[in-house]
Image (tube, rainbow, N blue to C red):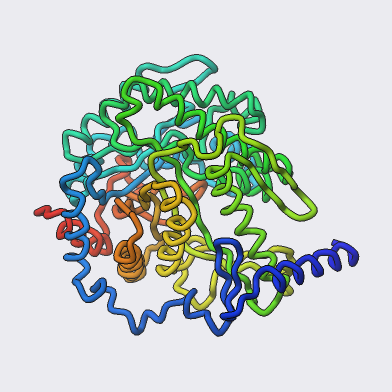
Amino acid sequence: MNIYNFAYFYLLALGLTSSVLKTADNTYQITAYQVLSQAEKNKIHWDWSKIDTSKINGIPIENFFANTVAARATTDEPWLFGTGTSAYQIEENCKNNWSEFIESHPELGKQPAGDCCKGVTHALSDVKLMSDIGMNSYRFSVEWSKINPEPGVFDQAELDRYEMQCKELVKAGIKPYVTLFHYTEPVWFYNKGSFEHKENIQYFVDFCAKVFEQLHPYVHLWGTFCSFEGYAFPGWLTGEKPPAKKDPILAGRVLKNTLEAHVAVYKKLKSMPGGQESKIGFYKTIMQLDPASPYNPLDRAASYMGSRAMGYTIYNFFKTGVFDLWIPGKVTMKEPSEYLQAGEKFGDFISLSYYCHNYISFFNLSTRKLFYMYRDPQEVPTANDRYTIYGEGLYRALKELDQELSKPCNLPIYVVENGIGTNNDEYRTLFFQRYLFALGHAIADGIDVRGYAYWSLMDNNEWGRTDKCYGLYATDYNHPGKTRTLKPSAYYYINLVKAALGNKL
């Protein structure tokens, strides 16, 4: 960045933060996002030393969630407590864009998933593991590359396998929540440019329709994309994930096309037999980008732009049918949707994926990097380099979704991906205490949350690493059978679920 670009950006930042953001109560209002001054930082960080996480508004947390469960017991959408996995991360023999990416980039040092969990072998016995700990829902993905190995070709044996798994779940009293896209795609689709091209959307619609046709009698909830922004930006903007491109315009195009693909799939499935009775939604990933220094207008502007790209752009698309992405000096896209008109139905619920927040600085002196994101060194760390234990962030994320989509569009929320990677059982217990307290706090404040799923059922391949250890069950990667062993720290969650659902384990 030369001095002229820097001067331009600084003036832009001053304009954004002084005329738009500063308000009379000394907070910073960014459309629907709050970036707080240092004096108001308690709204970003709760004082956990003064919080009794065993109670929600004076009610024991087990009783609070039991009441929450009871309130939904007579509806066709009961409260869900569960856990989740994704196909590539646990199944054997996945040949897709991720396996191709890892094999073609050995310099990254990533481990192929291989048979690290033998998820296909253990599909039915894993149902028993969930039943043993009292779960009443399971969020999992189906592997596109296995079901649809070539354009227009579908593997009936793979569809039958997933149907058998769904039947076993239903038999055990566990409601299946099927994710249709969890970051992986067939190599043939990858080679066609993935979602860079709107013409490729129909391939995904056809795949989803085929899966829905066979599995809809058993599936309680359907999710299309596990993350719009979590797929488009790391793959095409920062180059961290396949296809490892750094093209802001292509990143915008992919983001728009995945949003369009969701709407196309929603409309297609709703038009099919069983569609009107089925609940079909999408995921929203949230990671708050708080300014490294709330006094620095450049940091506040960086926070604003990141929040706008990953939040407003998606919310606005669904509410208005207009894709509006702005990354100063890189991308300006404002285009109407080809699939969605303002006010049209685009989903039956929202799924939230949330882990923590990050700080963002316009320029970090120690790394000499622009738009540098980092975790708070004062928060409890996890095995993920960017994640910490930040329970209050779940409340903030639910509040954001509530204000932006849930209430305006009358859509309930399910927290479907929330977990911690750690080998420290004390940290995992602390995680559960804080995040489940924040969840209860959000429900008590009137946010329409209808379920929670912990990530994940067992330790698995976290996109090239098996040492992050998110599971309720530990996986013995050295054992030929990839055996699972329940972790002591899982019991905080298990005991709460048992009390809330009335299970006797």
x and y, in percent, of residue 239 in the image: 67, 47
Query: Does the image show residue 385?
Result: no
Q: Is residue 357 left or right of residue 75?
A: right
Residue 119, picture quadrant: top left
Residue that lies at the very extreme toward the left in this rendered image: 504
**Res 419 → quadrant:** bottom left
Residue drawn at (41%, 65%), measured in percent from left and top? 395
Seen in the picture, residue 233 relative to 12 is either above or below; the reply is above
Q: Is residue 225 above or below residue 30?
A: above
Residue 199 at what x, y percent from top left?
A: 63, 24
Q: Quadrant of the C terminus?
A: bottom left
Where is the N terminus found, in terms of image quarters?
Answer: bottom right
**Count of residue discs:** 0
Q: Residue at x 54, y 32 (%)?
A: 261
Looking at the image, residue 426 lies above or below residue 101: below
Please give the name of the residue rendered at 22% of the width and 40% of the height, measured from the top-left corner: 76
**234 with respect to 435 (left or right):** right
Q: Nearer the viewer, residue 350 or 117?
A: 350
Q: Is residue 22 above or below residue 104?
A: below
Q: Hey, which residue is sitting farthest top in the picture?
A: 153
> Residue 366: image x %, image y %?
71, 74
Q: Nearer the viewer, residue 211 or 297?
A: 297
In the image: residue 410, left or right of residue 501: right
Q: Can residue 39 be seen here? A: yes
Residue 155, horizontal then vertical, whole percent: 41, 17
